[in-house]
Amino acid sequence: MSRRCDIATMQLCANKLDKKDFFGKSDPFLVFYRSNEDGTFTICHKTEVIKNNLNPVWQSFTLPVRALCNGDYDRTVKVDVFDWDRDGSHDFIGEFTTSYRELSRGQSQFNVYEVLNPKKKGKKKKYVNSGTVTLLSFKVESEYTFVDFIRGGTQLNFTVAIDFTASNGNPSQPTSLHYMSPYQMNAYAMALKAVGDIIQDYDSDKLFPAYGFGAKLPPDGKISHAFPLNSNMDDPNCVAIEGVLEAYFQSLRSVQLYGPTNFAPVINQVARCAADMTDGSQYFVLLMITDGVISDMDQTKEAVVNAAGLPMSIIIVGVGPAEFDAMEELDGDEVRVSSRGRSAERDIVQFVPFRDYIDRSGNQVLSMARLAKDVLAEIPDQLLSFMRSRAIEPRPAVPASGSQSHSTATTTSTSISSIAKGRNTHA
């Protein structure tokens, strides 16, 4: 049988929280902590801020039960109540403790909590509390996990797209982001290998379409924004990540770096493939590595909005010192990407600047490990969000002896799903 993950959904309200000042204004929010065996606490959820309200009702939110109690139903759950301040110096209103077992009783007299401020309690003899927080609703449902789909045979199809625009610099010069040093990999190669080495274990045939964009191609100098790195227009597949790297280095020797930096063509190309495989058997991951500003931002946003309804995720790795404001907009963590009045159905873009992961001591292996951890962290939740949106359930687990390649994918799935732990809490 397929394993499922228990998900808790709850909603709370507060009554008569302490006033911030004589105007009676308060902007409260809650922070939930799971207690650890060593006596420390780990944040597992923050609610939204309710502005100017001493009797707030927070939106219902959802988080994995394991994040709340790690399987121990009587483990202490601590909740801090804060008054939000713009400068980040949030005022502590008070705290209370509960447990998963208590919360599971639902709305009752057991789930009305006094918010206590230890400092005020010690100073004021007549202090009773700083308000109360009441649980309005609590329910637990089971959901399939990323590992369930991988064990059921869902394949990740990995596609690579590399920026060949002139802003990268002449590949023959050491100052170029594409410089092929005999001693170490450049940033493009490091990003490719870091992400590819992990994700290739989820693709049984190890064949990866690999494209370049923003270059003039021989022999006629035509500009292309989706040319195969292996120069084979009929079959852009490269064998494993080593094959992608080989094709990348070969392209650097044959094409002319040019421009502009257009993202939409290659996104639409992968989206066309994803549109033919919406039954849950395939999920497409596009890795785009670039050094600068997107030239076709409007078309790119439209492409992302269209792709958000497909079994597809986009990873963008920014290399070099440029500003990446446009990439942050595409990331959609704060505000969902929109185009022509339509918002993206799901958040499918993950952007990271590679410079944030470079080890100061020059350790390339450590830099690559840090990068892979962050860029792959959102893939499991993005895959699950698509499956949920289409009510797709995983197929029965494929027997471990079925094939060596699937056995590898099943084993390695633990690594990518563990990367996502702690980041799959959603409100």
Image (cartoon, rainbow, N blue to C red):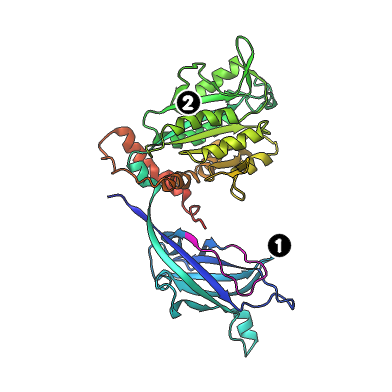
Q: Residue at x 46, y 59 (%)?
A: 63
The quarter of the displayed image where residue 29 is located:
bottom right
Task: Using the image, determine if residue 199 lies above or below residue 388.
Answer: above
- How many numbered marks, from 0 up? 2
Considering depth in this image, is 387 or 242 the residue closer to the camera? 387
Q: State the residue position of label 1.
A: 86
Q: Secondary structure at mark 2?
A: strand
Q: Is residue 354 visible?
A: yes
The quarter of the displayed image where residue 58 is located:
bottom right
Query: How far across and how far down the image is residue 226, in percent?
Result: 56, 23
Considering depth in this image, is 215 or 136 the residue closer to the camera? 136
The quarter of the displayed image where residue 49 is located:
bottom right
Mark 2 nearby-residue class (10 Å; few <14, some 14–19, many ≥20): many
Q: At label 1, which amino acid type do we have?
A: Arg
Task: Using the image, determine if residue 337 lies above or below residue 298.
Answer: below
Indicate which disc residue 209 carries. 2
Q: Which residues are magenta?
A: 48-62
Query: How far across and how far down the image is residue 346, in percent?
Result: 52, 45
Indicate which disc residue 49 carries. none
* Disc 1 to disc 2, C-alpha distance: 47 Å
Q: Residue at x 26, y 40 (%)?
A: 399
